[in-house]
Image (cartoon, coloured by chain):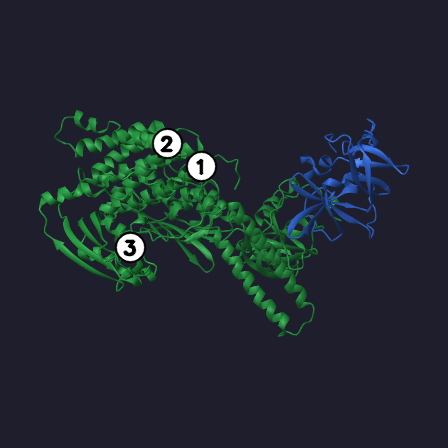
Chain colours: A green, B blue
Amino acid sequence: MSFETDPMAEIRASFFVECEELLEALQDSLQIMDDGAEDSETINVVFRAVHSIKGGAGAFGLDALVRFAHRFETVLDALRTDRMQADAAAVKVFFQCADHLSDLVRHSRDGGSDPAEQSGALLARLDALLGTEAAPAEDIAEPEIDFQPMGLTLDLAALDDALPADLPPLNALPPLCDLADLPPPEADGLKTYRLHFTPDTKLYETGNEPFLLLRALEELGAAQITCDTTRLPKQQDLIPEHSYLSWTVKLETDAEEAKILSVFDFVEGLCSLDLQPIAVTPDAASASAPRTPKTPTAPPSPSAAPATAKAPTPIKNVVRVDLDRIERLVNLVGELVINQAMLSQSLETANLPPHGDAMNGLEEFQRLTRDIQDSVMMLRAQPVKSLFQRMSRIIREASTAVNKEVRLHTEGDATEVDKTVIERLADPLTHMIRNAVDHGLETPADRIAAGKPAEGQVKLSASHRSGRVIIEVSDDGAGINRPRVLQIAIDKGLIPADAQLSDSEIDNLLFLPGFSTAGSVSDLSGRGVGMDVVRTAIQALGGRITITSVPGSGTCFSISLPLTLAVLDGMVIDTAGETLVVPLNLVVETLTFQAQDVSMIRPGQHVVRVRGAFVPIVDLAAELGYRAPQNSYDGAVALLIAHENGNRAALLIDNILDQRQVVIKGLDDGFSRAAGIAAATILGDGQIALILDPSDIITNAAQPLQKPLRAGALT
Amino acid sequence: MTDNNRDSTIELLTFQLAGHEYALDIMSVREIRSWTRATPLPHAPTCMRGVINLRGTVLPVLDLGDRLGLSPQVQSERAVIIVVAQGETLTGLLVDAVSDIVALTKDDLQPPPDLANGAATGMVSALTLIDERMVRVLDLAATVTLEKGMAA
């Protein structure tokens, strides 16, 4: 839009977006290799991803990135041409290299600390892979020659430098395919087919394109394509809609007949096909290969190979939109929702006939508004896949640090969650994953002693359940050692020594601030940052976290999150004439006090008995300075609030008005942000209601000395 | 009220506060709204009357009389909220009544004498005479920016 922007900067930005996608494809394929389910295409995807990153990096002069990617690529090339095998150790090194590659990309994009110094160690490991596996018998100098930077890199840079700046972004640039991308002709299992392909006129009428089909054939192997134009009539007889052309393809491939035919699945009945295997002498095969250069138009992404049966990602139509525009839309829809609520309220007070046109129209309007709101919220949603991929890296690093073998299983990668939620979930999830590896899983020796496989399992899953997102982190470790947790809590003075706690209450002790169960403080997770931080972070997102643990078979942390941050399930309450909203996720239950349940601890401080436990009473109106504290609690209504550190408090209010979704409006941080107030919302009558932060209010109430006199506010 | 266009005229919106006349550069005024009940903010300084709904956004409203340290007035029917923009942020200023829009040249403005010593120090940027009545021109930035200490 703006002409001032540097076109090179735009291409560069799109290169980094492309890199993210390539790195994701790289991680995916490595995961497939790690699971032992790879085929030649998987390795090709890995190779192409690294190759494309290198190519782009060369164009922008990112030398460190090019150097590392080149060496990585060299090893992958050896793998691709069967000069070495991808065993578990090799895949592990590849993972580390992929992680390092993404560090380098990030460094090139954002600056910051230079990770390049780690390159050396990883390169040495890559070299070791080649040195031991590709050329065990050879002289040590031999592989080193292999690693000399080759002309390819230089060509790339020269080629890309010569590009005019207004070229399409890099993802549209042709990858630098060469014959190396083809399966080597001398490899075993290659067969040659002759295929006659004659499209009917109908094929064109239905919008199919022979070129794409032929290109798909080329993906299968070396294809020699000749076009038969003999049926073309003279110019005056030519009917433009008719099909006159046919093609003969000589295809040399390791794919089976069915796979070749599957290319034409979508045009079945729209063309005539004849596929014949032909016996071919090795001479003919090698002679045909050089004459069939692969068309350089195939993009390098894995999704560009629709003909290969294993291609995992379906092609998606994607539009990249500026986040600001989405934000604006989200805000507008928020206003629409408020407006609709106001309209409903005024129509309801207008005493209209309940089944009249106006009321029916309003109902329709409400439904539409809700649909629009849901759709717009989905715009901000992203699959959790990127987050899960980061976690698989954490697993790898964590398991190496504590010498445990750990395998990560992910489920529901495609589950979509609000972008902000994903960003803010990374830290707590990292912490939980580390905990699972460090504390949750036993050492390999203990596992074998317990009759389990030495390799521990950590499962990360995401799913949608009744309007919320559930993310679970579970391990198959020893489960929570409840007697020990209890003992630690007592030793640290967190609970009284004679406390009688249920199993789940003991489990929840883990969320107490400053709690750590690891016998020794390890580098990995014992940094004095406990699960309480995790819980606070989750609650800040409007979520809840729960633990379930079965001794001997593992622990599961379950996080339940709202789908979006822009809307909140709230309880609309009334206190001292003010309407306020309490986030519903913090309300455990509602209480009505009986006089005999309330006792005074000291003047101004009361507790209420709730099922045998004494819960402090916090007078909301007094806390907010709306009125002086009350003395009679008989018949009063209160909300039982779950406090961060597992404590509960009864928040005294006047009345519960409603339970509804409210649109969150941020308050200016400057001067209107007050303690105990999280945000604001606009109610159906157009009035602003404040959204409370009950935890904040309860914490403040617990520090009576710091409470200033608020005479001024009592007007 | 910067001196960039020295010779040009400036337009001021004048309004009443506790029997005195004040003025603001009209370029910073976005709109004038009749008084609606504001939702009070707990723990806010007394001059902060609360927040109101300005077409879907949350607008903080300052009681300008209280902010300037004037004696509290019984709120009349003519009380209005002047919505002003300071940079990116909008603020509502509660005043007793708006009076007029006047055009002046910069030469008509006099700097305030250097002996003022009260809450309003620094908030009045100039004085001027309109129909033999003294009008105080407010420095908007100083007026709408509450010091950190006040927000306790």
The residue furthest top is A141
Label 2 marks a residue whose chain is A
Look at the image and tell me whether residue A452 can be seen.
no
For image coordinates 43% across by 53% down, the residue present is: A416
Helix, strand or loop for disc 3: helix
State the image coordinates of residue B7 (x, y, percent, origin top left). Answer: 78, 31
State the image coordinates of residue A600 (x, y, percent, origin top left). Answer: 64, 52
Q: Amino acid at mark 2?
A: Ala
Q: Is residue A182 left or right of residue B35?
A: left
Mark 2 burial class by Cα count in 10 Å: few <14, some 14-19, many 20+:
few
For image coordinates 55% across by 54% down, the residue present is: A568
Q: Is residue A62 above or below residue A211?
A: above
Residue A210 got which mark?
Answer: 3
- State how far apart marks 3 and 1 are (Cα): 64 Å
N-terminal-most mark, 1 or 2? 2
Residue carrying label 2: A162
Q: Amino acid at mark 3?
A: Pro
